[in-house]
Amino acid sequence: MRAADSLSRRIIAVFILFGVVLSLFFAVLAALAVEGIEVHLVDNRLADVEKWALPRRAAGLGVDLPAGVRFHQGDEIPAPLRGLPAGVSEVDLDGIGLHVLSGTGANGPYVVVDHESDYEKIELVVYSAFATFFVGFMALGAALGGVVGRRIVIPLRELADAVTNDVTPLPLTERSDELGILARALDAHTSELRAFLDRERFFTGDVSHELRTPLTVIMGAAEILLHDDTHAAVRAPAERIYRAAREATECVTVLLLLARAPEVARLAPVSVSEIARRETERYQFMVSDKPVALRCIGAVDISVRAPNELCMSAIGNLIRNACQYTEQGSVTVELQPGRVIVTDTGPGLPEAVRQTLGRGQRSAPSSGSAGTGLGLSLVTRICDYLGARLEYQDCPDGGSCFTIVFHTESMTDSRNPNAALTGA
């Protein structure tokens, strides 16, 4: 898992984002409050002095002003304060911040100057305190996010590790919070899955064991009939019986293998190319009485780590279905690097089957099942087991095109079976 995808990091980010939004909200409120206080304390003070001093100066009376406030009119106005726009202005004079109210009366322009206002210092203190609060709030948000993230993520990791390593019983089941509910739900579901898999494994093993003996008897009896020259009339039925029994035996073997856990990396490599050629020859009898050419083309040597029986069943099912439903034309098995392609000129798959394959469902029905009786569903399961991929597309001139694509990890170099290829 990438660090950016960590749930703990996301929780910390949410806390920090919350802190930023909350801090910006308070910053706007603080700025409005500071400006409002400035208008109330400074601007209104200067306006009151203006209303009181201007008529007295116009009447030639003396003007007694509060400490720190000066009223200048006409030529009395200091040069740096002349020409200011009407209203309150902030002027920096020799490093001292002044609030100046400018205007024009009957006797000319005038200014009211506040020399001793400490409001700029107050603003600096307020904004500095807010900046400190912002930094502290971010640090607090990150710390709280880290604590909360660890309290949530660490138990989740323990639970995930326990599920991955098949630990029973799962941890956290004794907790009364949401993590405990999740742990108990996972524990119950895992137990159900384990029981189901055990039942399926036992069932497959028992059925395989019970079927092997009668199938062996049937095959033996069929072989006796095949070698009995005194009953030539039963030779053809005996061949069909023997072929059906052998395919049923192969089906039992395939189902037994699929019921086991995939461990293809430990298996010896098998030649898929040789299997494809043998299966092509094996099903020549299905097209012998039809104008259909069954051939295998391509000189590519494909080797994969997989059970030989599974490869035979997957390729054989595709070839058998193609031969059974192609009445004229050809069935071609093409070998390409990393893939086996079976193409026919038959009627193609029904729409319902194509949609099922397109959705990637494993229970794909097969109207062309023969022999083993499981058709495309079995091929799909075998491909999933081997880590391969089954692809389907309609041929431009009619018919079907199935492709088994083997993953690079399961393939081996034909010159060195123990070395993995770097590409297909």
Image (cartoon, grey):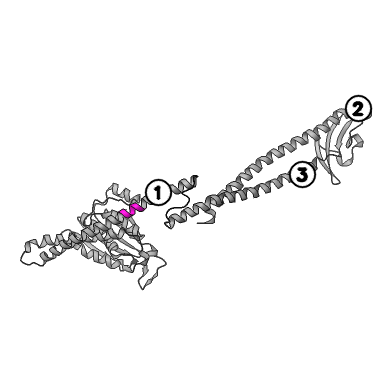
Amino acid type at circle 1 is Ala
- Say if mark 1 contacts mark 3, CB within 8 Å: no
Amino acid type at circle 3 is Val
Apparent side of residue 23 relative to residue 71 in the rendered image (left or right):
left
The local crowd at label 3, few if under 14, some if 14 to 19, many if 20 or more residues have their Cα within 10 Å, is: few
Q: Nearer the viewer, mark 1 or mark 3?
A: 1
Q: Is 177 situated above or below 5?
A: above
Q: Earlier in the sequence, mark 2 or mark 3?
A: 2
What kind of element bears circle 3?
A: helix
Which one is nearer the viewer's eye here, 328 or 355? 355
Quarter of the image with the C terminus in it: bottom left
Residue 344 disc label: none
Q: Which residues are magenta?
A: 194-199
The residue pinned by badge 2 equals 56
Alpha carbons under labels 1 and 3: distance apart = 61 Å
Q: Earlier in the sequence, mark 2 or mark 1?
A: 2
- For the point 22% across and 58% down, the residue is 210
- For the point 73% across and 45% down, the residue is 129
Q: Tell me where residue 16 appears, x and y as whole percent.
A: 61, 47
The residue pinned by badge 3 equals 125
- For the point 32% across and 49% down, the residue is 356
What kind of element bears circle 1?
A: helix
Q: Tell me where residue 70 appears, x and y as whole percent.
A: 89, 36
Amino acid type at circle 2 is Arg
Q: Splitting the image into 4 quarters, where does residue 323 fall? A: bottom left
Residue 196 located within the stretch drawn in magenta = yes
- Say if mark 2 contacts mark 1, CB within 8 Å: no
The residue pinned by badge 1 equals 188
The local crowd at label 2, few if under 14, some if 14 to 19, many if 20 or more residues have their Cα within 10 Å, is: few
Alpha carbons under labels 2 and 1: distance apart = 93 Å
